[in-house]
Structure formats: structure tokens, C-alpha cells
């Protein structure tokens, strides 16, 4: 009885109505925690056709602990083929699993699904941030509570967390969806082209999402050229129609400190990585699972939420996350270098992995579960 009373007094303020802020809110609300979500009404107003690949282990976590995602919301990917500019039609690597590797969802549909579910919760409220002064007073009046910042480049980031490990990938990602003739569409393809990594990510039998990360310091490509190149590298689909193209600069960021006083950073604020491995949001989901475990530990002890949880969370995640994103950076640098040598280094990969199935399996496990299973 006593434990239940304390838990119902738990309060957390979250900043950011993006995917990170909403999924975190949903996880907390499910644990009977009162959540106030503060958001800037001018941010995230644009429609987007971006998609997100969610690893199997993370989708299992979402489905079992957060919310039911109906099957028609995602497409299952059970095979990934990796090619290079010079590997012609043969793959340098192929990952396939008897089970699913990952699922592709439309960012906006997923966001709306969580939003809808949150609006039904009694212990959840949205609050508009009207000005920087209201932001400041919110922080000053939140001494007892925990604040989790999921938004990039706001007052909190610039004032309390200005020092990060960062790097400009000198690349920009073009993202869009194309419609095509109906086919069985469960194999993702990544081609390390001389322009940068190009991914074809199946969204349904008739829709495929494209992420083309281009080395912008070397190639200045406009939308017309992007479409021409996608048509050139596509060997699989009969394309009918392209959606509009979105463009985003690619940067690497790793937070030096995860929390300050009672404020915790979360999501891309902690780690922003190159999309070539589709791991940014997956890392956030792994962090979320760890944060929830720490909350459960407090619950079991009958203790209210306190600032110690932020330290425990940092201890459990920071070094693993840094190692993981460093691995992604090594892959990015490797293929950049390899393309300068006409893929002569990556051409050796098929011989190496054929002999060693363990290595391939290891890659699958790391992409699915992070470094925790090692
Ligand atoms: C091109 C691209 C593809 C990605 N694909 C995956 C993936 O398959 N699986 C995964 O786990 N993580 C992926 N990520 C990372 C993931 O998008 C972010 O970790 C997550 O969306 C950020 O959280 P948010 O949406 O809550 O934050 P927000 O503040 O809403 O989003 C900001 C971040 O979203 C990303 N972004 C902005 N515009 C686009 C766009 N048009 N397309 C894609 N991303 C955009 C940028 O990284 C930006 O920093 C990708 C990132 C990029 C840039």
C-alpha cells in the first residue's frame, strides 16, 4: 500500500514532442509516473515521409512493454544485401536470418500512434513552451522533479550541455519514398557507391524508402541528379513515382555528460550517428529499456524517483554507447577510404566471411541487441 502511494507521486517533465519525447513519455506513463511534456509549437510542424528501421529486439520491447503496434504499421525485413560500386551484381555481404532482422515504419504514422495512445492517459499532459522565459521558469520551478530533454539545440543544450564530442561527416542524406510495381519486398539493400552509402529499405509490396548519404564536400548533387543515380543503381524495382525529397546534414555527436543536476539528456542529444547502420533511434530504445529497469529497481525498494537514477543510468549506458558509435564511425570511414581505392579492400570481405560464419552472426547480434549481449 505504502509503495503504491509513493509511486503515484512520481513526476517527470519531458521536453520535446518528437519520437524520442513521445516514446519516453509512453514508457513512463505505463509505469504510473505523471508526465508533463513541454514542447515548442513551432518545432516539428513539417510533414515528413522519413522512415525508421527498428531492430527485432527493440520491436519486441515496444510491443511487450510500451504499446501494441498493429502489423500493418510496419514491413518485416529478413535479409540485407551489401554491395559496393565495384562489386557489380555480387554482394560483398549478405545477412539473412530465419527470423526477422528489423522492421521498417513510417516515422509520422508511428509518432501519431504513440500520440493517440498518450492522449488517452490520465497521468499525461502536453504544455506549450511559449517563450524562453517560460522555459527558464519551468526549469527553476522543477527542483524536486526530474527533467528529461529530448529536443536538440534548445535553451538547456546551450546553457548546461555545451561540450560534446562532435564531428561533421561532411555528408548530407537525401530521403524519400518511391512507388513501384508490386513485388515480394523483404530484402533491404545497401550499396556503398562512390557518392556515399545508398540504402533501399522496403516499406511494403509497392513502396520502398531511400536513404542516400552523399559526401557533399566531393559531390554537389541536386534532386534531379539524385533521382538519376537512384534509377541507375536500382536493379530490382519498376519505379512508378517518387515522393518529394527531404535533405538533412549528417553530424556525429556524443554527449560528454548525460545529466546536470536534475536534468537528463535523451535520444539524439546523447548520441547522434551516421544513418548507414540505421542505429540512432535503436540506441535510444536500448537506453530506454535500461532507464526503465533502473526505475523498476527503485519501485521494488519503495523509493521515489530521485537524482541518483540519472547517475545510475549514465553508468550503465555511456561507455557502451560510446564504443558502439565509435564502431559505426569506423565503418563509415572504412567505406569512404575503400571507395578511394576502387573498393579493393572491401572486395576481400566475401572471402573472409565465407570462411567465418561466426563474424556474420556477430554483426547480426550487435545490430539487434547492441553491445550488451557480448
Ligand atoms: C537519414 C537518416 C536515417 C535514419 N534512419 C534510422 C533508422 O533506420 N533507424 C534508427 O534507429 N535510426 C535512424 N536514424 C536516426 C533517427 O532518425 C533519430 O535517432 C531519431 O529520429 C531522432 O529522434 P527524434 O525523431 O525524436 O528527434 P527529432 O528532433 O525529431 O529529429 C531530429 C533528427 O532526425 C533526423 N532527421 C531529420 N530529418 C530526417 C529525414 N528526412 N530522414 C531521416 N532522419 C531525419 C536527424 O538525425 C535529426 O538530427 C536516421 C537518421 C537519419 C538522419
Image (spheres, helix red, strand yellow):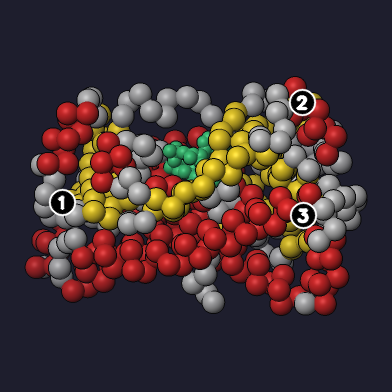
Q: Residues within 10 Å of mark 2 (few under 14, many from 20)?
A: few
Name the secondary structure under disc 2.
helix
275 or 218: nearer the viewer: 218
Q: Residues within 10 Å of mark 3 (few under 14, many from 20)?
A: some
Name the secondary structure under disc 1.
loop
Of callouts 3 and 2, the N-terminal one: 2
Residue underneath mark 1: 145
Q: Is residue 90 left or right of residue 160?
A: right
Residue underneath mark 3: 338
Eye-nearest disc, 3 or 2: 3
Of callouts 3 and 1, the N-terminal one: 1
Residue underneath mark 2: 225
80 in relation to 183, above or below: below
**Residue drawn at 37 percent across, 69 percent down:** 316
State the CA–CA distance, disc 3 to disc 2: 23 Å
* The disc label shown at residue 99, or none: none
Which quadrant of the rendered structure holds the N terminus?
Answer: bottom left
Residue 353 percent coordinates (x, y): 79, 71
| The image quarter in which residue 196 lies | top right
172 or 25: nearer the viewer: 172
Amino acid at each position: 500500500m505504502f509503495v503504491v502511494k509513493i509511486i503515484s507521486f512520481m513526476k517527470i517533465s519531458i521536453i520535446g514532442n518528437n519520437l524520442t519525447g513521445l516514446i519516453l513519455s509512453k514508457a513512463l506513463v505505463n509505469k504510473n509516473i505523471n508526465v508533463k511534456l513541454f514542447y515548442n509549437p513551432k518545432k516539428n510542424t513539417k510533414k515528413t515521409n522519413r522512415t525508421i528501421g527498428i531492430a527485432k529486439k527493440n520491436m519486441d520491447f515496444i510491443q511487450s512493454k510500451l504499446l501494441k503496434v498493429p502489423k500493418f504499421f510496419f514491413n518485416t525485413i529478413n535479409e540485407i544485401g551489401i554491395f559496393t560500386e565495384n562489386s557489380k551484381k555480387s554482394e560483398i555481404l549478405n545477412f539473412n536470418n530465419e527470423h526477422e532482422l528489423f522492421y521498417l515504419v513510417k516515422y509520422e504514422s508511428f509518432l501519431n500512434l504513440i500520440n493517440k495512445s498518450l492522449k488517452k492517459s490520465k497521468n499525461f499532459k502536453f504544455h506549450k513552451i511559449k517563450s524562453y522565459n517560460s522555459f527558464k521558469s519551468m526549469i527553476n520551478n522543477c527542483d524536486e522533479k526530474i527533467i528529461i530533454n529530448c529536443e536538440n539545440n534548445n535553451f538547456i543544450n546551450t546553457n548546461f550541455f555545451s561540450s560534446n564530442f562532435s564531428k561533421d561527416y561532411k555528408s548530407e542524406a537525401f530521403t524519400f519514398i518511391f512507388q513501384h510495381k508490386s513485388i515480394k519486398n523483404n530484402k533491404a539493400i545497401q550499396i556503398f557507391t562512390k557518392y556515399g552509402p545508398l540504402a533501399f529499405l522496403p516499406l511494403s509490396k509497392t513502396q520502398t524508402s531511400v536513404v542516400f548519404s552523399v559526401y557533399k564536400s566531393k559531390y554537389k548533387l541536386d534532386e534531379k541528379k539524385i533521382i538519376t543515380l537512384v534509377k541507375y543503381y536500382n536493379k530490382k524495382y519498376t519505379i512508378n513515382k517518387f515522393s518529394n525529397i527531404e535533405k538533412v546534414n549528417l553530424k556525429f555527436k556524443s554527449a560528454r555528460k548525460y545529466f546536470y543536476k536534475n536534468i537528463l539528456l535523451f535520444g539524439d542529444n546523447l548520441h547522434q550517428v551516421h544513418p548507414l547502420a540505421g542505429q540512432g533511434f535503436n540506441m535510444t530504445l536500448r537506453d530506454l529499456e535500461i532507464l526503465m529497469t533502473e526505475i523498476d529497481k527503485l519501485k521494488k525498494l519503495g523509493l521515489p524517483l530521485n537524482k541518483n537514477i540519472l547517475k545510475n543510468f549514465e553508468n550503465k549506458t555511456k561507455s557502451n554507447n560510446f564504443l558502439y558509435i565509435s564502431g559505426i564511425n569506423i565503418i563509415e570511414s572504412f567505406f569512404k577510404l575503400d571507395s578511394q581505392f576502387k573498393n579493393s579492400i572491401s572486395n576481400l570481405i566475401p572471402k573472409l566471411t565465407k570462411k567465418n560464419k561466426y563474424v556474420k552472426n556477430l554483426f547480426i547480434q550487435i545490430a539487434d541487441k547492441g553491445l550488451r549481449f557480448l
